[in-house]
Image (spheres, rainbow, N blue to C red):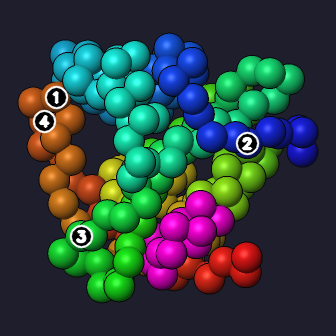
């Protein structure tokens, strides 16, 4: 397993994060989707300015995974994010988790997920939820390993294409510090 440093993003990371976010999203979803919808989605969600806003938002934790000073993965956690179908006192949301394709299968995602769960626990969350595209078997299998179970669904607006995401939830173990 590679030596991975996981740290909180700063606004200085916004440009690199925007590039990584768009690249990993395109790598994951281009094959199954329309290019026009992909371009619309990426333009709307992955600009440098949007990444700066999310990094500065006190309700977000943006985690970067680095190997040899290269950002290879990231996750964004909304520290408090209620959702109708999520029965939890103080839920957090795993908003995004993406790993560069060249690092798939090398333990990076597991390291990032460990930090995601710790971040949610430190925020006082008792559960964490996420939306995952119903046609993403790799992600579904990954989340099942962490105890996530489907509790609902919602529409994920992908460009002009309304897609179905499953809402999955898992318990968060209390932080010990």
User: Distance between the Cα atoms at labels 2 and 1?
Assistant: 31 Å
| Residue indicated by mark 4 | 161
In the rendered view, does 2 fall on the left or right side of 128?
right
Disc 4 and disc 1 in contact, CB within 8 angstroms: yes
Of tags 4 and 2, the one toward the viewer is: 2
Answer with mark 2 or mark 1, whichever residue precedes in sequence: 2
Secondary structure category for the residue under label 2: strand
Residue 58 image offset from top left, x and y in percent = 41, 48
Front residue of 16 and 175: 175
User: Distance between the Cα atoms at labels 4 and 1?
Assistant: 6 Å
Task: Pick the quarter of the image with the N terminus.
Answer: top right
Please report the residue visible at 78 percent of the width from the left and 48 percent of the height from the top. 107
Q: Which stretch appears magenta?
A: 117-129
Residue 42 image offset from top left, x and y in percent = 30, 22
User: Distance between the Cα atoms at labels 3 and 4?
Assistant: 22 Å
Disc number placed over residue 6 in the picture, else none: 2
Disc number placed over residue 14 in the picture, else none: none
Of tags 2 and 1, the one toward the viewer is: 2
Front residue of 76 and 141: 76
In the rendered view, does 4 fall on the left or right side of 96?
right
């Amino acid at each position: 397993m590679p030596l991975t440093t996981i740290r909180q993003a700063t606004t200085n990371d916004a440009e690199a994060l925007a590039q990584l976010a768009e690249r990993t999203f395109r790598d994951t979803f281009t094959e199954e989707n329309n290019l026009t919808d992909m371009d619309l989605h990426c333009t709307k969600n992955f600009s440098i300015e949007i990444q700066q806003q999310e990094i500065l938002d006190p309700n977000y934790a943006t985690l970067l995974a680095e190997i040899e000073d290269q950002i290879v993965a990231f996750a964004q956690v909304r520290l408090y994010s209620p959702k109708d179908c999520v029965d939890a006192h103080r839920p957090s949301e795993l908003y995004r988790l993406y790993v560069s394709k060249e690092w798939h299968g090398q333990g990076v995602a597991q390291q990032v997920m460990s930090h995601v769960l710790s971040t949610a626990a430190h925020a006082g969350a008792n559960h964490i939820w996420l939306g995952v595209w119903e046609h993403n078997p790799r992600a579904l299998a990954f989340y099942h390993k962490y105890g996530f179970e489907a509790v609902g669904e919602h529409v994920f607006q992908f460009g002009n294409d309304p897609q179905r995401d499953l809402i999955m939830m898992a318990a968060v173990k209390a932080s010990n510090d």
